[in-house]
Amino acid sequence: MVKIQIEGQILDLPPDIAVNDDAIRRAIAPVFPQVANATFTRTDGPDGVTLIKVTKRAGTKGTYDHVLKHLKDSPRHVNPIFPLYQRLYQNDARLASPEEFFSIQGQLDQALHAGETELQDTNTILTRLASAPGHASRRTPVGF
C-alpha cells in the first residue's frame, strides 16, 4: 500500500500512480499545482506501507519583472479621440466654439473611425480569449 503526505494530509495513492515521480506529478497537478516543483521523499514503514512525503519548493522567480519590462518597452498608444476630446473640452468648458468644432470635423471622423476599429479588434481578441479552451499547466500563474 502507498500513501502520500501533502501539507500534513495523508491520502491513499493507487500503486500504478506511485510508480515514479512524474506519474505522481501528472496525477496531482490539476488539484495541487505546486507539485510541479516539489520533491518526493519515500519511506517504507514496518507495516509494509510506503509513505511518499511531498515537500514544496519555491518556483522560478522573475517572470513578473519580465512581463513588466515588456509592457514598459512596448510602444505608447493613445486612442486618437482623447486628444480631440481634451481640445474641445479644455478648461472645463462644456462645448468648444462651433467654428473650432467644424474646423476639426475631418480629424473627428478619422479619430472615430480609428477608435471603432480598435474597439472591434479588442472585442475580437476578447471573444477569442473567452472561447479558447483551458489547458493544464505544471506552473502556477503569476499572482496565484
Image (cartoon, rainbow, N blue to C red):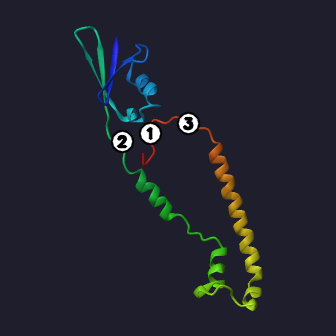
Q: Which residue is mark 1?
A: 139
Helix, strand, or loop for circle 3? loop
Quadrant of residue 13 in the image? top left
Q: Which residue is mark 2?
A: 59
The type of residue carrying mark 3 is His
Label 2 crowd bin: few (<14), some (14–19), many (20+), radius 10 Å: few
* Mark 3–mark 1 distance (CA, rounded to whole Å): 11 Å
| Residue displayed at 45% across by 44% down | 141
Q: Which residue is mark 3?
A: 135
| Residue displayed at 44% across by 55% down | 66
Quadrant of residue 115 in the image? bottom right
CB under 8 Å between callouts 2 and 3? no
The type of residue carrying mark 1 is Arg
The type of residue carrying mark 2 is Gly
Nearest the eye: 21 or 83: 83
The mark that comes first in sequence, 2 or 1, is 2
Give the position of the C terminus as an image quadrant: top left
Percent from the top left, x then y, of residue 69?
Answer: 45, 60
